[in-house]
Amino acid sequence: MDTRGIISHISRYVKLSPEEEQFFTSILIPVKLKQGEFAETADEVTTTFIHVNSGCLMTYYTDPSGNDHVIQFSTSGWWTADLHSLTHNQPSIYSTRALADSEIFLLPKIRLEELVERYPVFERFFRIMFQNSLVTHQHRIVQAFSFTAEQRYEHFQQKYPQLEQFVPLKYIASYLGITPEFLSKIRRKRMEK
């Protein structure tokens, strides 16, 4: 699998030497997922970080009633994993599956620890990624509390302009915290304008 995309992504934040780049790409595990296949499943301990090389993944929580609650979509260039499970070695409460045929790289936790110890530039890179992730999740919390459903949908369209082409509306509605029927009503209203 082509590693140029992931190296280009990392190079936006830190400069890698050829040795750092070579070691990093040597520890990645390439995986191809078909639409609907899982990259991570609830009730299992998360042992890898996932980088989306192409395609789209959806991370969600399934409540005791069997309802899925979408936490995030991960498209090309995004990293994802259940950090609580990964850090505390406890079963994940999330599942992550492909919404489209996808190519991902897995970075095992044990190899990540070796990577950051051997090459501190990666410690900096992952710190930046975690900071960005925290900011994104904080913004999402603020939006959930203070934005109207229409504003959340508008923000979603700006953040993920291509997703509506292949993500079922029920998952978008779940991500926005509304019913699919209400999302349809918002979309119809926007088309009429």
Image: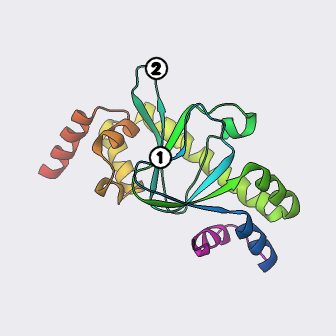
* Residue in view at x 79 percent, y 72 percent: 20
Q: Nearer the viewer, residue 131 or 56?
A: 56
Q: Amino acid at mark 2?
A: Pro
* Residue in view at x 79 percent, y 57 percent: 123
| Residue on which disc 1 sits | 97
Question: On screen, 32 above or below 60?
Answer: below
Dot 2: element: loop
Residue 144 percent coordinates (x, y): 44, 34
| N-terminal-most mark, 1 or 2 | 2
15 in the magenta segment: yes
Magenta stretch bounds: 1-17
The image's colour scheme reads rainbow
Q: As drawn, is 52 to the left or to the right of 129?
A: left
| Residue on which disc 2 sits | 64
Q: Amino acid at mark 1?
A: Arg
Q: As drawn, is 163 to the left or to the right of 17?
A: left
2 in the magenta segment: yes
Residue at mark 1 to residue at mark 2: CA–CA distance: 19 Å
Q: As drawn, is 41 to the left or to the right of 176?
A: right
| Neighbours of disc 2 within 10 Å: few (<14), some (14-19), many (20+) | few
